[in-house]
Image: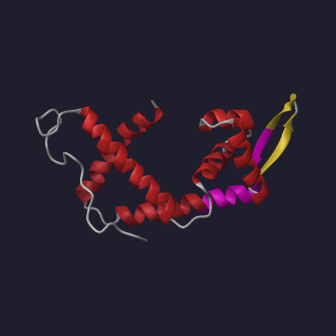
Amino acid sequence: MSTPSSPVTTAYPSAPLGSPENPGPFHLATDLRLACLRIARRNRFESVVEVAPHQMAVLSRVACGPASAGDLAEWERVSAPTMSRTIGGLVEAGWIERSADPTDGRRVIVTITDEGRERLAETRRARDEWMAARLETLSEADLEALQAALPVLERIATS
């Protein structure tokens, strides 16, 4: 695991929002976006898993139920050929299966295999363990602040 040589600080760590030192939501948006990206990137690459982020997204989606290749492409906001390559890699790994849609033979339906469910669970567990190890280093006040921020972050993520 790598650690930065010096801590990364936000542009306006302690100034109240709207003050001259912290001009408003735009700067908070920048800081929040960058912090979320750094956390997500480190979580993906330091949790030592073999599932690429785009593969993880497809596995997570089809674990909820079968989906068409077109629906997956739309959900992931990628082109049909890109999704086809992702599906091909997952089929080759044995983590998903393709079949013809029983109501429309032109469509491909993707379902997760037992091995895919196991890989998904292992990957989630490794990523959760990575995050938990970081959270264990925080103060009680920091943990409470994160807990309080979760509903707001979830609303942002789903809006």
Q: Is residue 12 above or below residue 75?
A: below
Q: Quadrant of residue 49?
A: bottom right
Q: Residue furthest bottom?
A: 1
**Residue toward you, 104 or 78:** 78
Q: Which residue extends farthest left?
A: 20
* Res 65 visible: no
The correct choice, above or below, for 100 with respect to 136 in the image is above
User: Which residues make up the magenta segment?
Assistant: 109-122
In this rendering, would 153 be left or right of 52? Answer: left
Q: Is residue 110 magenta?
A: yes
* Predominant SS along the magenta part: helix
Rendered location of residue 116, percent (x, y): 71, 56
> What residue is shown at x 47% (from left), y 33% (from top)?
158
Q: At 42% from the left edge and 62% from the top edge, which residue is drawn?
A: 132
**In front: 17, or 142?**
17
How many numbered marks have been drawn onto this rendered protein structure? 0
| Quarter of the image that includes the N terminus | bottom left
In the rendered view of the protein, which quadrant contains the C terminus? top left
Q: Is residue 10 visible?
A: yes
Q: Quadrant of residue 106?
A: top right
For image coordinates 44% across by 37% down, the residue present is 157
> Front-most of 135 and 17?
17
Q: Is residue 30 above or below residue 138?
A: above
Whole-percent x, y for residue 15 in the image: 13, 43
Left or right? Give the position of 60 relative to 137. right
Q: Give the percent coordinates (x, y) of residue 85.
A: 72, 47
Q: Is residue 74 magenta?
A: no
Left or right? Give the position of 100 relative to 110: right
Provide residue 112's location: percent of width, then percent of height. Answer: 74, 49
